[in-house]
Image: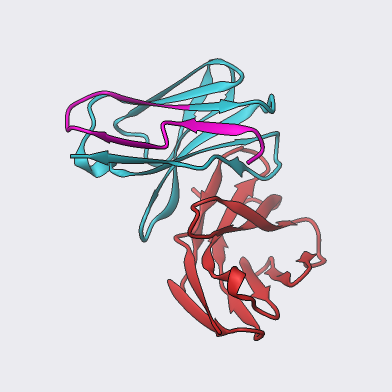
Amino acid sequence: DAGITQSPRHKVTETGTPVTLRCHQTENHRYMYWYRQDPGHGLRLIHYSYGVKDTDKGEVSDGYSVSRSKTEDFLLTLESATSSQTSVYFCAISASLTPLHFGNGTRLTVT
Amino acid sequence: AQTVTQSQPEMSVQEAETVTLSCTYDTSESDYYLFWYKQPPSRQMILVIRQEAYKQQNATENRFSVNFQKAAKSFSLKISDSQLGDAAMYFCAYRGSNNNDMRFGAGTRLTVKP
């Protein structure tokens, strides 16, 4: 899994609560990504980072924020979780223009 | 924005036969990269094959090969001698050379029949 760890692997939370997902890498890659996977939509990019404190929005960024204070960690925060954010979340890393390598995913359920 | 379309939500193939999964994309860029990823029930995303747009030769990795038609913006995946372990979701993905995000299609679920 190219040195990527996502935590937690599973989480159940209630609507309106804040949630933070963590991605940790040991590869020292510059780029890190958060995707969500939903049936019929494939993987959709939420946010990505191209360096420490450098982030950009993806195609489905509403309701999500990210932070990257260290090269190895990329955090995804749902400020106030909603049922529409129930999904499987994947973190990925890459060096420039190389394929993405993915973590094992986090299954988030918002009740 | 670049879009990736996989028009086959599901495909099936007989073991040892050949199957082709379709992918088209929309872009105004001339230089980019294309990928196929496999996602088995374990949920792990596994890179199957990659193609650089500047290369005319189609990429091949063992039983997996692509048919890259740049003018038609088409990037299909051919799996030869299909095996039971090939059963998975397959995602086509695009990455431009001027940005670093990667866009995925909706996926094709491949079933392999013994």
Compared across the picture, whether A105 is left or right of B95 comes to left
Bounds of the magenta segment: A1-22
Instruction: Report the coloring of the rendering.
Output: by chain
Task: Check the image and report above or below for B56 versus A66.
Answer: below
Chain B display color: red
Chain A display color: cyan
- Estimate the x, y position of residue A27 in percent, counting from the top left: 69, 28
Whether residue A20 is in magenta: the answer is: yes
- Look at 64% across and 33% down and name the residue there: A3
Task: Check the image and report above or below for B30 versus A81.
Answer: below
Whether residue B27 is visible here, answered yes or no, is no
- Estimate the x, y position of residue A73 in percent, counting from the top left: 54, 21
Compared across the picture, whether A14 is left or right of A8 comes to left
Q: Which quadrant of the structure image shows residue B100?
A: top right
Q: Which of A45 and B46 is in front in this view?
A: B46
- Look at 59% across and 33% down and name the residue there: A4
Q: Which quadrant of the structure image shows residue A50?
A: top right
